[in-house]
Amino acid sequence: MGKRHFILGKGELLTSPIKIKHNYPNKKAYPYTFEESLAQLNSKFVTIANNVDKLPALACPADYAVETITLNPAFIARSYYPSALFEKLNVIPIGSRNISIVPRKWNRKIVPKKTTTSQLFIAGKRKILRNIPHITEQLDPNSIEALDFSKIEDVGLHNPILDSVKEIKQENISMFFEIALQLIPFDSQARIIMNSFWDFSHNLSIECLQDYSFKSGNLLFVPVRGTKLEIMQLSKFSFIRVIRLMPKIRDIPSSTTRVSLPAIKVSLPSVKQPISDTIHVAIMDGGLPQDNPIKPWLYRYLKGDENAKDIIERFLQNSRMPE
């Protein structure tokens, strides 16, 4: 006799709901109560507003300024983002970065130690920043906005990073710098910030090379030329994230060992017109000789240092021209 096969019908009648017991509390433990956060942060908000009011009018485009909100490390997950609080305060989040801090308290059983957390950048009109302490004092301690407020570890007035600028010894020598300008993510306000930055720079006699600026995400990178003293004055502009010396192309020492690579044959088109106008190529190199194979398609060739000379001998010795 062959094997018997059984068909089971209406198997769903044999099922029943399964309740999973979680071994963790439904409500997340907050390191600080709402009252503790008020006592710690509101006096700082008052100090920040007073410092913002001292900034030049041109440094605050459309009367906007930037503050920083540092979250307690327990609340860096995206689900804990304090969006309800920001909406209540009428401020605009414009970016963030990771920083390392030692929190005053946290919800772990070990002593707080240095750890990474999120620092948020918020923009608001100066009168709104002035009003933050009053708004937070009126919050219902059980509201979502109050819980968001309890996630904050620290607040501060945004100051741009100036590490490489501070190291410059000669204060009156004109040099090239790169500036990262953080923008409000709305086209109209972004244009206001940029136009105010051009005006502020012009008043300080700083040359802005606008044609070579480029945008990446919510940041606008702008090359400028000025002295250390002028750049330090420029750093008061509220929306500057970073100012650093313009990096230079370094020459390869002749003693460096080089690996010979096989020649690669390249067939360049004979026509002098581009195949497509939608393609833009940036060539980063240490210089090009006068007689080079891409010359017919080279519309603009600029040197980072006009006084620098191309090392033609090394170029011819170590480069293989397309055949």
Image (cartoon, rainbow, N blue to C red):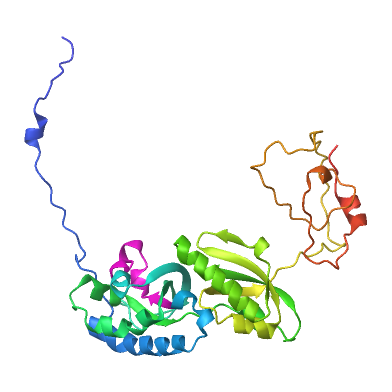
Position of 268 with respect to 235 (left or right) is right
In this view, 282 is above or below 5: below
Residue 48: give x, y in percent of width and height.
Answer: 42, 86
Looking at this view, name the residue that lies furthest to the right. Answer: 313
161, 207: nearer the viewer: 207
Q: Is residue 111 visible?
A: no
In this view, 183 is above or below 257: below
Position of 108 with respect to 264 (left or right) is left
Residue 156: give x, y in percent of width and height.
Answer: 43, 82
Residue 91: give x, y in percent of width and height.
Answer: 36, 72
Position of 172 with respect to 39 (left or right) is right
Q: Quadrant of residue 153?
A: bottom left
Q: Is residue 123 visible?
A: yes
Q: Quadrant of residue 40?
A: bottom left
Q: Quadrant of the N terminus?
A: top left
Position of 320 with respect to 139 (left or right) is right
Identity of the residue drawn at 63% across and 80% down: 203
Identity of the residue drawn at 83% across and 60% down: 256
Looking at this view, name the residue that lies furthest to the left. Answer: 13
280, 104: nearer the viewer: 280
Identity of the residue drawn at 63% across and 63% down: 213
In this view, 110 is above or below 262: below
Does 73 appear in magenta?
Answer: yes
Give the extent of the magenta segment: 65-84
How many circles with numbers are drawn on the protein?
A: 0
Does 177 appear in magenta?
Answer: no
Q: Quadrant of the C terminus?
A: top right
Q: Quadrant of residue 14?
A: top left
Residue 29: give x, y in percent of width and height.
Answer: 24, 73
